[in-house]
Amino acid sequence: MINYIIQVILFQVLFVAVYDFFLSKETFFVKNRWYLLGTAILSFILPLLKISTVQKAVPQEYYILLPEVVLSPQKVIEKAAWYQSFNYLEILFWSGCIFFFVVFLVKLERIVRLVLQYGVARKENYKLVLLPKETKAFSFFNYIFLGNDISSPKREKIIQHELVHSDQKHTIDLLFFEFLKIVMWFNPMVYVYQSRISLVHEYISDAVASKSDQKENYINHLLSDIFQVEHISFINQFYKHSLIKKRIIMMTKTQSKKVKQLKYLLLIPLLGSMILYTACSDENKSSEAIAKKELVTIYNSKDGEITSVKGEKSTYLDRYFGEKIDLGKELSINDLSEEEKNEFLALKESLEDEGSVLGVKVYKGTSNRKIIAYDLVKIKIKEMVDKGGSIPFSLLEKVPTFPGCAEGDKDCFNRSLQEFVKENFDTSIANELGLDSGKKRLYVQFKIDKEGNVIDVKARAPHPILQQYAEELVQKLPQMQPGEQRGKKVRVGYTLPITFNIE
């Protein structure tokens, strides 16, 4: 979400920069109004766009088979628990939203109170509210608020000006940015946008209202009195000190040539670069739908007919064994979600043992679940067992059994392994190695052979001492009951991730 917000603000900065440098001094007021509204909305849509063909692949550090073991000192957990349960950024965000919503309601209440207090004089196409002993002049939708102390000749000019705001629904523009200020109160560009479009509104109204009179007279009326200003951001005000000079300059400016409208074409390369940027960003990858873990469906085929059966294991990807058939589009690893990638790569790595299986591929399938297809045309599972090769965990009929667990109980195996690591892993060793503070992760790969012994232990860690320590730790695992496939004992490979904190 933070990446999304940063991209929104960045795009709005670029859009406003183009407006300020190339468009703001032109007299295409209506087009500028729609430019500001359109780009404000586009800045929220563009970060959500993605083009899969240009997205970058993120290499995986390692492939996970076993549940991750997270090591944290118990005292630290107990000490931090009371404040770690709070999301302070979320609290700050919602506090800001509530505050600015209340401010908006207060401003709205001031307008409603003026209507109720002084009443409404209904005219042909607007509603007039006269404010006694005031020189204020502003409009809100088709309500025009005028101070009684404004002279009659000037009132007519002001009403003509404010009627343009009413007819062109300028209040809706301001309320749109007021809404953005509530939900993105921390974004300075929302205030910049509201300021720019308020000025464009005045240009539009001045251009229309001054047609009924000489511009010199209209400007003299504009300068003849200094009216009070109502400090409400979503009303159209006839007189605002900071805008008077800019309005006069624009009224006296020569009409821009039509050829200068080509400046709006600058949007094309700008939008193209923004779309390319968002398509290649990591945010788009993380915004993909998260795969759901369900009981695996195992497909098989014989003589062109496909059968399926539900397995006992929950996975992100279904499995297919059998003759080569159409399983839909073949997918690359970049087409998979993070969870699907981990499962596929872990399985692929386990199958690389001794070349026991030719390989695996992923297909889109016909359901909402992707399918891993095993290439078992030349080498069957029976041959793998006969040759003494390691069997992939996902193909096992009976998984290894940890001492004290029921035979083949996978959950008990995982739980017992995690408890063993937590009880025996000394995190103080990691703190003495001079590593940078923060979360660290190491991976241990090992096999359980046909006798239930732990063999071929290999570790990958952020420090050689940690690597050696992790290998020695896993080698101390107790002897287990080996896994079985079709009644024969087989070797099984595992990858164990361990996460810990460096203080």
Image (cartoon, rainbow, N blue to C red):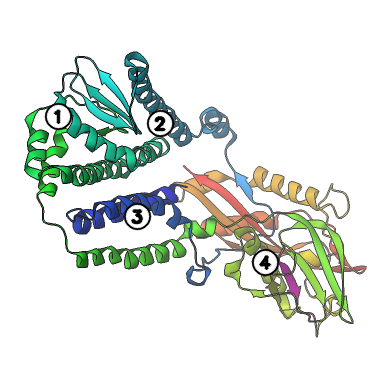
Q: In terms of sequence position, does the residue under pointer 4 or pointer 2 come before the other?
A: 2
Tag shown at residue 11: 3
Which residues lie in the magenta part?
Answer: 370-376
**Distance CA(mark 3)–CA(mark 2):** 23 Å
**Distance CA(mark 2)–CA(mark 1):** 41 Å
Q: Residues within 10 Å of mark 2 (few under 14, many from 20)?
A: some
Q: Observer-nearest residue: 368 or 117?
A: 117
Image position of 316 (left or right of 427)? right
Q: Position of residue 270 (x, y in %)?
A: 33, 64
* Residue found at the far bottom of this picture: 378
Q: Position of residue 295 (x, y in %)?
A: 80, 56
Mark 4, residue position: 344
Q: Amino acid at mark 1?
A: Lys
Q: Position of residue 196 (x, y in %)?
A: 25, 45
Disc 1 is placed on an element classified as helix
Tag shown at residue 96: 2
- Which is more foreground, mark 1 or mark 4? 1
Image position of 459 (left or right of 231)? right
Disc 4 is placed on an element classified as helix
Disc 3 is placed on an element classified as helix
Q: In terms of sequence position, does the residue under pointer 2 or pointer 1 come before the other?
A: 2
